[in-house]
């Protein structure tokens, strides 16, 4: 079998999926869950490639493998949310699309493979009608059907959908593994590889995107940390206006909260006497100053408040309200 399907990390999941394929005991449906950028889609595509491969290995050489790589395989149906650039927008997948692009075509026999595969990345983007329609396919799939879903918000899925899938929760990878990948496979300098690995929080896909982003993410990070520093000494009115503007763009909001969370964690660990290496060690002086002025309790509350706001993002519930509360409650320097 090919070495971990060429994937970085998640070895346990790859090994398990390889066994299912090798032993010819595939389930009808698989759900890969985990934070955005952790590698769910990459793993799902490697799994699909191996399942359709002539050697059942994802060899990368046979015709089915090449067709899957180009997302051109006649037995592969993919229903994607709208994408702009590298970023996935949170546009909803509606019932008409899921019916036309998956539910109906999956009832036709495979053209050239053992399976006909339906893949829906970011299944949390499916609205309720779409999810309910899909549930019927999940309940009575054709024998040859292989369904794969990914989600960064498994809690938001109908329990009946989750329970019919073989679920894999992908976890963050060690920072060192991500750094080595960026440096050895992607030619990053050690310094940049190290910084992005620490900022990634163990999400390898995020780190690779950030690297190919040509430094834009690092520029945005400088800007967001600068804005945070200013907000700490700003009035309620300024903070409120900032929250309102940031809430308009869901992707910027997530990215900003991620960056802030890393920074506040550093402040918290420093305030608690830490000894843990900081994520933002290129902002070490500011982290130390904030730890001294703000103290452990208020910092810990801020970390919690940011985490709560992030957890509300995928569900679109009161994320804006949570962001306003977060900003108004930020410690004052
Ligand atoms: Zn192959």
Image: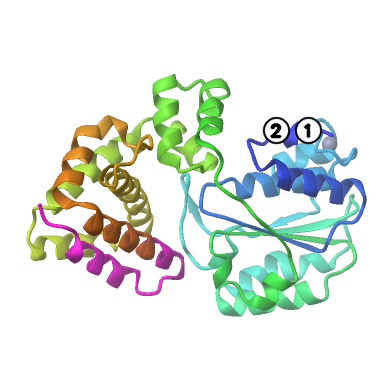
The answer to whether one can see residue 199 in this image is yes
Q: Is residue 312 magenta?
A: yes
Residue under label 2: 6
The circle on residue 18 is none
Contact flag, marks 2 and 1 (Cβ < 8 Å): yes
Sequence-earlier tag: 2 or 1: 2
Specify whether 182 is left or right of 158: left
- Kindly indicate the quadrant of the structure image that contains residue 311: bottom left
Check mark 2 vs ligand 1: CB closer than 8 Å? yes or no: no
Would you say the magenta stretch is mainly helix, strand or loop? helix
* Location of residue 164 in the rendering, given as x and y in whole percent from the top left corner: 75, 71
- Return the x and y of residue 84 as percentages of the image width and height: 46, 50
Residue at 39%, 61% in the rendered image: 310
Q: Which residues are drawn in magenta?
A: 310-333
Give the structural element (helix, strand or loop) at label 1: loop
- Residue 101 is inside the magenta segment: no
- Quick check: which quadrant has ligand 1? top right
- At horizontal 16% and vertical 40% (from top left) the residue drawn is 289
User: At x 48% / y 37%, what residue is drawn?
Assistant: 207
Residue 211 at x, y percent in the picture: 45, 32
**Foreground pick, 226 / 77:** 226
Q: Nearer the viewer, residue 215 or 190?
A: 190
Q: Is residue 292 above or below residue 117?
A: above
Instruction: Judge whether 140 appears above or below 66 on screen.
Output: below
Residue 80 to residue 285: above or below: below
- Ligand 1 lies under 8 Å from the Cβ of mark 1: yes
- Relative placement, left or right, of 52 versus 168 is right
- Name the residue tied to disc 1: 60
Q: Around disc 1, counting alpha carbons within 10 Å, would you say few (fewer than 14), some (14 to 19), or many (20 or more)?
A: many
Structure colour scheme: rainbow
Looking at the image, the residue that sits furthest to the front is: 273
């Amino acid at each position: 079998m090919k070495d971990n399907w060429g994937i970085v990390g998640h070895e346990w999941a790859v090994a398990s999926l390889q066994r299912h394929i090798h032993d010819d005991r595939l389930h009808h449906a698989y759900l890969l869950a985990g934070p955005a950028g952790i590698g769910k889609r990459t793993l799902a595509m490697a799994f699909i490639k191996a399942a359709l491969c002539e050697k059942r290995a994802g060899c990368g050489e046979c015709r089915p493998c090449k067709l899957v790589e180009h997302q051109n395989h006649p037995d592969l149906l993919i229903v994607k949310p709208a994408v702009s650039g590298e970023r996935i927008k949170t546009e909803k997948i509606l019932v008409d699309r899921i019916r036309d692009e998956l539910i109906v075509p999956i009832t036709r026999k495979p053209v050239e493979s053992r399976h006909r595969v339906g893949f829906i990345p970011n299944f949390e983007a499916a609205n309720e009608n779409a999810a309910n329609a899909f549930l019927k396919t999940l309940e009575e799939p054709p024998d040859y059907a292989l369904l794969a879903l990914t989600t960064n918000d498994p809690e938001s899925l109908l329990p009946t959908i989750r329970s019919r899938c073989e679920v894999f929760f992908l976890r963050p990878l060690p920072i060192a593994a991500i750094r080595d990948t960026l440096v050895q496979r992607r030619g990053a300098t050690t310094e940049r590889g190290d910084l992005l690995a620490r900022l990634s929080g163990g999400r390898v896909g995020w780190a690779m995107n950030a690297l190919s982003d040509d430094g834009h993410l690092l520029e945005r990070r400088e800007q967001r940390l600068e804005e945070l520093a200013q907000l700490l000494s700003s009035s309620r009115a300024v903070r409120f206006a900032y929250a309102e503007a940031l809430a308009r763009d869901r992707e910027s909001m997530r990215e900003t909260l991620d960056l802030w969370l890393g920074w506040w964690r550093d402040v918290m660990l420093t305030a608690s006497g830490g000894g843990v290496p900081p994520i933002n060690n290129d902002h070490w002086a500011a982290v130390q100053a904030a730890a001294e002025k703000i103290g452990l309790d208020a910092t810990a509350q801020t970390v919690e408040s940011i985490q709560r706001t992030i957890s509300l993002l995928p569900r679109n519930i009161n994320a804006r309200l949570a962001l306003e509360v977060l900003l108004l409650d930020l410690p004052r320097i």
